[in-house]
Image: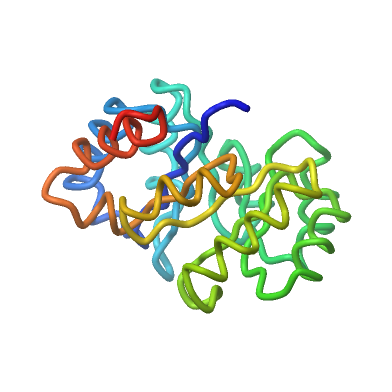
Amino acid sequence: MPDARLYLITPALNAADLAAFAPRFAEALGAGDVASVLVRLAPAADARRIVGALLEIAAAHDAALLIEHDARLAARLGADGVHVEAAKVAEAVESLKSQRIVGAGGLKLRDDAMTAGEAGADYVMFGEPGVSASFEATLERVGWWAEIFEAPCVACAASLDEVAPLAAAGADFIALEGAVWEAASAAEAVRAATEILAGRP
């Protein structure tokens, strides 16, 4: 079974954040095996400017760049995909015509995950803050999905200590947010996570 890969989730960004964030973003992507990035946008943010800047960096590091919620915006800005809640997966799949990635999050129940998979989601995400009841619940959900379904599973890790157990449970991708961006060095956090996934803790 291939090693799990990293999936980074940005903080909610405004254009004013770019000057400080973009260099850290580039360093993080250059520090390890990052497969995908989910860009979170602050309300009323300048999406074109933010996504444009980060897309260029992501492309240079061969990482797919997705944005939250809006499939049409993802297509218009040239992003690689969109991340939506289960109820919006079918609409996003239809809108993007299989030309971009459609990921599903906000999955509180097993039925939500199965609905997203049946609607054509390219991956499902478990363990998001405010969605999963506990780390143990996330481990259970990841193990259940990995055993039965073929679509990839992304598991959110609140800390680097959760990376190895989630990968062992069967996650295809490990999502990190605060564990990277709140660290003293985002690059060092990504490097450490990559080494954990490669079996070199």
Residue sitting farthest toward the left = 184
Q: Judge from the rendering whether residue 87 lies leftward or rightward of residue 155; answer left or right.
A: right
Residue name at image x 43 percent, y 38 percent:
52
Residue name at image x 27 percent, y 49 percent:
180
Image location (x, y in percent) of residue 148: 81, 49
Image location (x, y in percent) of residue 61: 40, 23
Q: Nearer the viewer, residue 162 or 153?
A: 162
Residue name at image x 45 percent, y 25 percent:
59
Residue name at image x 39 percent, y 55 percent:
162
Above or below, 4 against 110 in this view is above
Which quarter of the rendered picture does the N terminus lie within? Answer: top right
Image location (x, y in percent) of residue 186: 21, 43
Q: Judge from the rendering whether residue 101 lies leftward or rightward of residue 194; answer left or right.
A: right
Q: Nearer the viewer, residue 194 or 199?
A: 199
Image location (x, y in percent) of residue 31: 27, 28
Which quarter of the rendered picture does the C terminus lie within? Answer: top left
- Name which quarter of the figure residue 194 lies in: top left
Q: How is the image coloured?
A: rainbow
Q: Nearer the viewer, residue 100 or 52?
A: 100
Q: Judge from the rendering whether residue 3 lies leftward or rightward of residue 140; answer left or right.
A: left
